Image (cartoon, grey):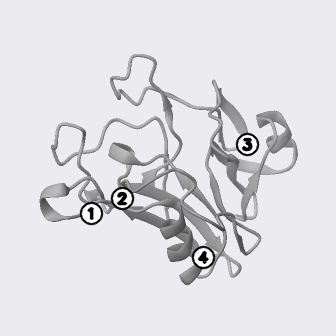
Amino acid sequence: AMNASGFIDPEYNSNGGLPHGVVIKDGKLVSNNQKLNNGGGIIGFTNDNKLVLTRMSGSQAIASGIRDAVEFGPFLIVNGEPSFIRGNGGWGDAPRSAIGQRKDGIVLFLVMDGRDYANGILGVDMVDMTEILMNYGAYNAANLDGGTSSGLVVNGNLINKPVNGAGQKQTRAIPNAWIVTQ
């Protein structure tokens, strides 16, 4: 499992409460809150498990066959083409998370640690994320919430080393996640 969309944080207390934008679960719109203007849109899976990156409303996404989705971004790779050509888009280095899919259907989760200054781990920018995902054959990929939200859990264990704003090694509460089940 890994974190998915960002969250509304009006008082900047990082509570991870309400997700930004659209959230679709099992073909039903479960959340449709304030959107972010971050170069993204709907990041979702169709009924045949194809990752789709699109800019449309939640109801349009459901009508087009998207089964599960969040709204976030920016999109990193669309139909095999990287979205970032020059510079880092002003994003800088930070802990980051992204989801992608290869043409053969394999889904890629990427979580990069950062802000661990004592150990020299600064994080990555959007170009770095795009290049890593391209190297693993991603055909479509999108950035997910980063920073202290970046967490990758395997068999119930947090396997990366997130660092929060106070320097503690932990994630914040998150509003939703991508989960692989058998």
**Can residue 136 be seen in the rendering of this structure?**
no
According to the image, label 3 marks what residue?
27
Q: CA distance from mark 2 to mark 3?
A: 25 Å
Task: Judge by depth and name the residue closer to the eye, 94 or 6.
Answer: 94
Which mark's residue is nearer the viewer, 2 or 3?
A: 2
Q: Are marks 1 and 2 in contact (CB under 8 Å)?
A: yes
Label 4, label 3: how many angstroms apart (C-alpha)? 22 Å
Residue on which disc 4 sits: 106
| Residue at image location 43% in from the left, 48% down from the top | 146
Q: From the viewer's perspective, is residue 85 above or below residue 137?
A: above
| Residue 98 location (% of width, % of height) | 51, 59
First in sequence: mark 1 or mark 4?
4
Residue 28 seen anywhere in this rendered image of the structure: yes
Q: Nearer the viewer, residue 162 or 74?
A: 74
Residue at image location 24% in from the left, 42% down from the top? 164
N-terminal-most mark, 3 or 1: 3
Q: Residue at x 45, y 57 (%)?
A: 97
| Quadrant in which residue 25 is drawn | top right
Name the amino acid, label 1. Ile
* Disc 3 residue type (three-letter): Gly
Looking at the image, the residue that sits furthest to the top is: 11
Q: Give the left or right position of residue 30, taking residue 181 as reference.
A: right
Real-space Cα distance between discs 3 and 1? 30 Å
Q: Secondary structure at mark 2?
A: loop
Residue type marked 2: Leu
Across and down, in percent, residue 172 comes to 31, 38
Residue under label 1: 159
